[in-house]
Image (tube, rainbow, N blue to C red):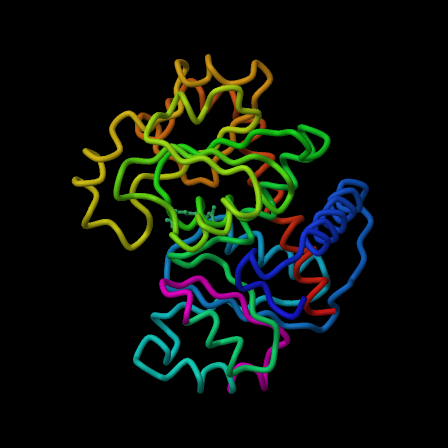
Amino acid sequence: MKHLLKLADLTREEILSVLNLADQLKYERKNNVKKKYLEGKHLGMIFQKSSTRTRVSFEVGMSELGGQALFLSNRDLQIGRGEPVEDTARVLSRYLDGIMIRTFAQKEVEDLAKYGSIPVINGLTDYCHPCQVLADLMTIREYKGGFKDLKFCFVGDGNNMANSLMVGAIKMGMSFAIACPKGYEPDTALVAWAKENGSFTMTTDVKEAAKDADVLYTDVWASMGQEEEKRVREEAFKGYQINADVMAVAKPDAIVLHCLPAHRGEEITADVFEAHANEIFDEAENRLHAQKAVLVKLLK
Ligand code: CP
Ligand code: NVA
């Protein structure tokens, strides 16, 4: 593992190895064991979009590992004024030990890795969100003891979350069902890959996707960068919601996950959200442990 650009680049064994280390780091933190795995290391964090969880968990994570994180907003970097990513990559590689980037185009992340000489971590693009899915898989394993024979159901937009969750679920051996409106399907190439490599179904019927599901997941109807489509999307996604009726067709012990931020009354009702708040906030906490594991794997 040289970078974390997208989940598809990782083998099942590499994912398991990250999850195992994440469990160990979580255990060490709970027991106040402080090991400075990344003493003296520096991570640059480029943000072209907003963030609460990703920013804070990477920053705290680096500090807990004995290293340091630098918050680099595109409003302050020359990249925001047009300096090419090829040059930014080569310059930052002379100062830093790793780069985390949150941006729009997946190509920008791939180019940073191509032109730089240090590990690059994708902290979300329009295409995928691998760090989130590692934390999601960690949470599923905590609650369900493993992945075998589980049905994973995603309700909503075929966005960056859906793309990464499909890959993660199929790689770990879960079956994956998505309910999304026509015109909002996940990436075509990933759908083809999922159909070839596991059990994948796509429908416009939420209850069909949710039937007997062990894990239900949803995300916002309009992602960052799609603010102008908000109205159109509110129309298109009406009914694509995890609510009590949908929970009634899932397994009785089903868990509900959400990458957050959540829009109550849109993709999820407030009652379902609160009934599953333990899972959802464990999931948010696990961003810290899963990313510390990624950092140790890539930067040590
Ligand atoms: N889930 C997630 O990535 O949250 P932030 O946008 O707050 O980083
Ligand atoms: N799909 C959302 C995920 C946020 C973590 C977005 O891209 O805004």
Q: Is residue 175 above or below residue 288?
A: above
Quadrant of image for the N terminus: bottom right
Who's the residue at 39% across and 52% down the image?
Answer: 187
Question: For the view shown, which residue lies furthest in the front direction?
Answer: 196
Coordinates of residue 261 in the picture (x, y in percent):
41, 40
Residue range of the region highlighted in magenta in the rendering? 91-107
Q: Is residue 228 magenta?
A: no
Who's the residue at 33% across and 75% down the image?
Answer: 80
**11 sits left or right of 274 in the view:** right
Who's the residue at 39% across and 14% down the image?
Answer: 245
Q: Is residue 261 above or below residue 242?
A: below
Relative depth, front residue between 196 and 89 = 196
Coordinates of residue 122 in the picture (x, y in percent):
51, 62
Relative depth, front residue between 32 and 16 = 16
Q: Is residue 84 above or below residue 229?
A: below
Coordinates of residue 73 in the picture (x, y in percent):
41, 67
Q: Is residue 99 magenta?
A: yes
Q: How many marks?
A: 0
**85 sits left or right of 294 in the view:** left
Relative depth, front residue between 196 and 1 = 196
